[in-house]
Amino acid sequence: MATQVVMPKLSPTMEEGQLSRWLKNEGDKVSVGEGLAEIDTDKATMEAQALASGVLRKILVPAGETVPLGAIIAIIGEPDEDISALLTEASSGAAQAEKKEQIEESTQGRAYGAPDELAQVVPGGERTQATVEGQPVKGDVGGAPSAPQEAAPQTQPSGGNGQRGDGRLIVSPIAARMAAEAGINLHSLKGTGPGGRIVKRDIEEAMKGGAPQPQAQPQAQPEQPAVQQAPARQPAVQPEGGAAPYREENVTTMRATIARRLVTSLGPIPHIFLTTEVEMDKTVEMRRQLNELDPENKVSLNDFVIKVAAVALMQHPAVNASFQEKAVRYYERADIGVAVALENGLITPVVRNANAKSVGQISREVKELAERARNRKLTPEEYTGATFSVSNLGMFGITEFTALINPPEACILAVGAMTPTPVVREGEVTVRQIMRVTLSCDHRIVDGATGAKFLQTLKKILENPLYLIA
């Protein structure tokens, strides 16, 4: 019996996935548990496995495309099995998504102005009528707006270029606005929406320099290539009027997730920021001695910061907490998220129970997690559930910065570069290795005094690291 393959939920925060690469071709045999495709989630690249045995009959989502959870991406069945009903069902699901997109486009279009205003500003072409959301507008497409006319009776389309038999273009509001802003002639486009309607994706393809084609019925789709790869880098677009050339790339699932989470951070969470200076000379010396003892596993200053932060959290439980609307959750151990920069964003792998681990253990674990993060091989349990985070930009020469809290954590520590600084000690000027750290606090849980006491403990231990073994 034929089976639909859907976009699986591969991480707790995943809402959509980008199909990075198909591991099987159409016509290949597959078994239960065998890898079908590589999926880019919001945090890692993971493998989607087959839940049925048979032959990969149809690939419905090409490599490089992003689809929501539950979307049908392929069909597995027997070699001679009739899968037309499943193809029709998949096509119906795509139509529902298209309808949702049309509604969103219509809403966004009206937010920018009346439909007739949007249609009129598209450049180029002869005098014609453009229809936006069923309202015809008379005048030069690309010229100054003229008064809107009464709506004309709808006729059947004569082709796939968004133009009806009576010469009217069928354009969604957001597509008309985007075309106007980008200087794209709608007459040169082929609409891929219902009835040849020009929609947002047609403008996006035109801006990339592509040539969108009308949608075909699933039964008429050509066979997929052997192994599909992600689309190549798009060429630059040269807009009219002397504006700077540009190129666009689809937002990765990771960057989209970062964007969504940041919106839920600084706005809803009332931040306060506390900064202090730490003399790192004794920690630097202890680090030197440890690295001499074990040159195969050299520890970093950031490893010390993670360890000391974890110890300090055990003494200040209000900082190792999260706000839960009707309750405050206090954690019994310090699971420290360590920010790791990636090519397309960042991720925070978690050092579990860091308060109970040595600096050497933390160092080895951070190295392994960071390497797996850069190769996008982390599992969800390795990058979710931190109780506190540390972000260090000192290696880039940044001396001080503020970091945004990663919900639902209550705090994040921003660590700057360590710099030789003249200071006065016992009436004499001397040079010390000074590092500035800034604690971002969720003011719903952590008051200024509470955060300041945590920083006092952090500072005391970093300036006298023998406390770690006292």
Image (cartoon, grey):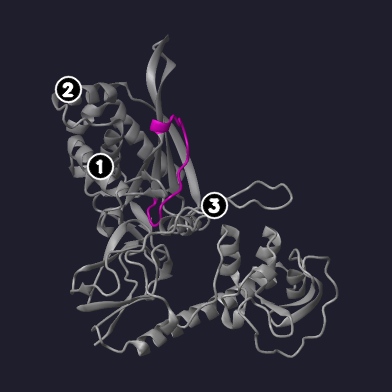
> Can you identify the residue that label 2 sits on?
292
- Residue 461 quadrant: top left
How far, Cα to Cα, is label 2 from label 3?
52 Å
Q: Residue furthest right?
A: 147
Is residue 409 one of those drawn in magenta? yes
Is residue 407 one of those drawn in magenta? yes
> Can you identify the residue that label 3 sits on?
235
Q: In this view, does 305 lie to the left or right of 264?
A: left
In the image, the segment drawn in magenta is 394-410
Judging depth in this view, the residue of 342 and 383 nearest the camera is 342
Is there CB contact under 8 Å for labels 1 and 3? no
Amino acid on which disc 1 is placed: Val
Residue beneath the point at 42% across and 49% down? 345
Residue beneath the point at 36% across and 40% down? 454
> Can you identify the residue that label 1 sits on?
366
Q: How crowded is mark 2: few (under 14 residues within 10 Å), some or many (20 or more)?
A: few
Q: In this view, does 244 lie above or below 427?
A: below
**Secondary structure at numbered mark 2:** helix
How far, Cα to Cα, is label 1 from label 3?
38 Å
Residue beneath the point at 43% across and 18% down? 421
**Secondary structure at numbered mark 3:** loop
